[in-house]
Image: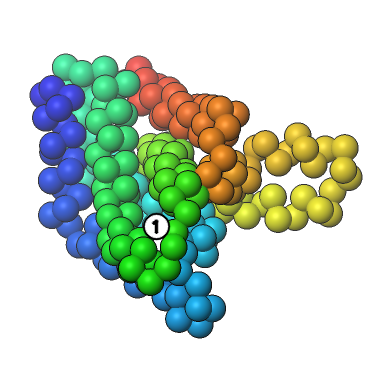
């Protein structure tokens, strides 16, 4: 089985199961509430409120998408077959990553309707909008890598979900409590958390340090997942 065939297989599995549609519908409902509450109640036609809450939403929805990636393979016994295929652990992980990333990124497609609505009723600064979508894609990539790593550790999908959820929530929330820490370590710790980097990109400020953060975070967790698979192959 080639890597391309594995990606097609994974995408087919995602979109033939109810999880992708349940997650997509819940995301659409919650993101719609956030957008239209700003649009009607605050009388402001923009997507800033939606983008600001994406780290929180993705902390829940992406673990739900990725939790079955390896955990289900372990549970039903197909994991042993998977690791004996004529593909490398890196190819297996990347196939899972690409399919999960595409599935998660697809949840952003309906939000284009919100953008069109905002453009119809107000003047939109496209810089933060482009930055918001770019930041969202980087955030999806990082959280997807975290979800795959969590799923590779266990055969229980719920446990994989909670491991991933906890890591993502810490990265998305913890910087809010930095004010409780000494100022000497705040600047160092703020670099660790995803929300500050995402907020910077979402404001339309494309800083290579923020992009490097997300690329590094994604690479680290994909590398850890590959390491888990190699360990399983060695028995």
Assess disc 1: are there few (<14), some (14-19) or many (≥20) residues with their C-alpha within 10 Å of its C-alpha: many
Snapshot quadrant of residue 39: bottom left
Element under disc 1 = helix
Split into 4 quadrants, where in the image is the C terminus? top left
Is residue 208 shown to the viewer in this render? yes
In this view of the protein, which residue sits in the foreground, 160 or 96? 96
Query: How many discs mark residues in the rendered view?
Result: 1
Which residue: 42% across, 29% down? 222
Which residue: 59% across, 44% down? 200
136 vs 31: above or below: above
In this view of the protein, which residue sits in the foreground, 15 or 214? 214
In this view of the protein, which residue sits in the foreground, 36 or 144? 36
Q: Position of residue 136 (x, y in %)?
A: 43, 47
For this view, does 175 lie left or right of residue 144?
right
5 vs 181: above or below: above
Which residue: 57% across, 40% down? 205
Which residue: 50% across, 78% down? 43
Query: Please, which residue is most extreme toward the front here?
Result: 123
In this view of the protein, which residue sits in the foreground, 124 or 204? 124
For this view, does 87 lie left or right of residue 55?
left
Q: Position of residue 10 (x, y in %)?
A: 18, 40
Residue at mark 1: 61
């Amino acid at each position: 089985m080639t890597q391309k065939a594995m990606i097609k297989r994974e995408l087919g599995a995602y979109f033939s199961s109810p999880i992708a549609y349940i997650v997509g519908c819940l995301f659409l409902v919650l993101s719609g509430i956030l957008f239209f509450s700003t649009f009607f109640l605050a009388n402001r036609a923009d997507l800033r409120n939606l983008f600001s809450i994406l780290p929180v939403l993705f902390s829940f929805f992406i673990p739900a998408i990725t939790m079955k990636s390896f955990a289900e393979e372990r549970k039903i016994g197909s994991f042993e077959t998977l690791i004996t295929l004529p593909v490398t652990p890196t190819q297996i992980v990347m196939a899972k990553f690409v399919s999960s990333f595409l599935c998660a990124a697809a949840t952003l497609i309906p939000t284009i309707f919100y953008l069109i609505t905002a453009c119809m009723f107000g003047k939109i600064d496209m810089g933060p909008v482009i930055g918001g979508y770019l930041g969202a894609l980087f955030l999806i990539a990082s959280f997807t890598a975290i979800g795959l790593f969590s799923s590779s550790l266990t055969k229980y999908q719920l446990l994989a979900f909670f491991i991933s959820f906890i890591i993502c929530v810490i990265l998305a929330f913890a910087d809010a409590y930095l004010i409780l820490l000494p100022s000497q370590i705040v600047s160092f710790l703020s670099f660790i958390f995803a929300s500050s980097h995402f907020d910077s990109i979402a404001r339309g400020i494309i800083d290579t340090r923020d992009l490097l953060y997300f690329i590094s975070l994604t690479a680290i967790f994909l590398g850890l997942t590959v390491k888990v698979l190699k360990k399983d192959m060695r028995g």
